[in-house]
Amino acid sequence: MVTDNITQILINWRNGDPEAINQLMPLVYDELRRLARGYLRKQPYHETLQPTVLVHETFLRMVNQQEVSWESRAQFFGLAATLMRRILVDHTREKMAAKRGGGEMRVSLSQADRFNPKTDVNLIALDDSLKELEELNPQHARIVELRYFGGLTIDETAEVMGISHATVERGWSLARAWLRRQIQN
């Protein structure tokens, strides 16, 4: 099973196997690319930030992580979610600065468990709202990051965070409602 292979390769990487990173990339590349394509599909800057570039930048940042004790596939994609979010926000801020505040990168939140169908959200507004949510409830902010940016399931999110399935479901529901209210205001 691929999930088991990924987990074993991550454990090998954690234990210092220099070949593990070369074995890992082919197994996770398609999934990372699928996630990146989904985020960038409706983006006004998709011409300058291709899914391949986003995946490669994410993977390079992951390889440089020194303090990660790799445990599982879900943890790997959780970190990928965090890094993709940072890359997308940084890219958006650069584009906005280049246009002196003009242009906005918008992301469809409908991909994330029908967050708010038909609504595109400014990525900067989402990031700012997530930072605010993180101050109020770090657990809920992490759930959103893993589910939306990482594309993790409820079970995978629970595994990464070390909490129950029911806790993730409640947190996801509450966080979506809170973010929807924040972003619409």
Image (cartoon, helix red, strand yellow):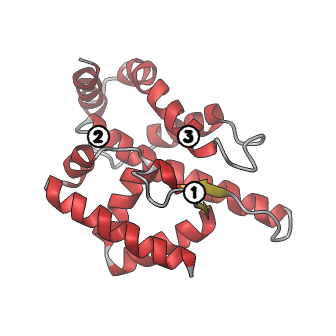
Hey, what amino acid is under mark 3?
Gly
Front disc: 2 or 3: 3
Which residue is rendered at x = 62% and y = 67% of the image? 124
Dot 2 or dot 1, earlier in sequence = 2
Measured from the top left, where is residue 57 in percent x and y? 58, 40
The residue at the point 29 percent across, 35 percent down is 73
How many residues crowd around disc 2 within 10 Å: few (fewer than 14), some, or many (20 or more)?
many
On screen, 95 above or below 13?
Answer: below
Q: Is residue 50 left or right of residue 162?
A: right
Front-most of 26 and 51?
51
Q: Which residue is mark 1?
A: 118
Q: Position of residue 33 (x, y in %)?
A: 53, 31
Q: Residue 155, relative to residue 9: is it above or below?
A: below
Marks 2 and 1, how far apart at CA:
29 Å
Circle 3 sits on which residue?
A: 38
Circle 1 — which element? Answer: loop
- Identify which amino acid the numbered label 2 is placed on: Ala
Name the residue tied to disc 2.
74
93 to the left or right of 146: right
